[in-house]
Image (cartoon, helix red, strand yellow):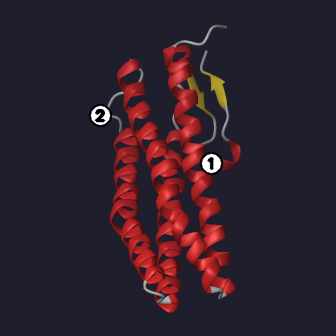
Amino acid sequence: MVANLYDWLMLVHIIAAMIWLGGLVALIVLATQAVRSGESDVVARFVANLRVTGLLLFLPAMALVLGLGIWMVFDSSAWSFAQGWIRLSLTLFAAAFVVGAVFQSRTAILAGRAVTHGQQAEATRQLRRWVWGGRVILLILLVATWPWSSSPAPSCRARGCRRTNTSLSALRLTSVV
């Protein structure tokens, strides 16, 4: 089987989502360890890396998830922006983006300023807030994966497939025919 454009879009879309989600989980774990360490140099090093990580890891991954997701809707006749799960996914993406752009970036900037001014308690406090914001984004992203995982793929829809069980623990497709 030769992969078509849609298959390649889906592959890169999923990889970008994995980078976004996996990177966020890793940073939350590392930030939590930095906060719990109580060592100002550990917090300072972590905070210094947040700006680079956000720009080089999260921004491209988020842009790819959104851009490729929209492209897939345009590329496939099976999808439309009128479908509820696509609208929900875009709404959840927007929510995650707003939390990241407004809250996360602000706490990272404030933590960086605190480190620069030698205010380690404030830097730790802002990093702790960043962890909570990261957890909110993580929850939003996990909720956003549900609509995607509970909708049949276009190739399956064309064959008349349907889900036999919509619980996340038992997702499988069967042919209607």
* Residue drawn at point x = 46 percent, y = 88 percent: 122
Q: Nearer the viewer, residue 9 or 110?
A: 110
Residue 153 sits in quarter? top right
Question: What type is the residue that disc 1 sits on?
Answer: Ser
Disc with the residue nearer the chain's start (1 vs 2): 2
Name the element at disc 1: loop
* Residue drawn at point x = 60 percent, y = 44 percent: 18
* Residue drawn at point x = 53 percent, y = 28 percent: 10
Name the element at disc 2: loop
Residue 156 lies, with reference to residue 53, above or below; the image says above
For label 2, the crowd category at 10 Å Cα-Cα, with few meaning under 14, some 14 to 19 and many 20 or more, is few
Residue 28's disc number: none
Q: What x and y, as percent, mark residue 88? A: 37, 47
Q: Nearer the viewer, residue 100 or 53?
A: 53
Q: What x and y, as percent, mark residue 29? A: 66, 68
- Residues at discs 1 and 2 in contact (Cβ within 8 Å): no
Residue 82's disc number: 2
Q: Which one is in front in this view, the residue at disc 1 or the one at disc 2?
A: 2
Distance, label 1 to label 2, CA atoms, is 24 Å
Q: What x and y, as percent, mark residue 108? A: 44, 71
Residue 172 lies, with reference to residue 76, above or below; the image says below
Say if residue 152 shows up in the picture: no
Q: Name the side, left or right, on which 19 lies relative to 72.
A: right
Q: Name the side, left or right, on which 106 lies relative to 26.
A: left
Residue 167's disc number: 1
Which residue lies most toward the top here? 1
Question: What type is the residue that disc 2 sits on?
Answer: Ala
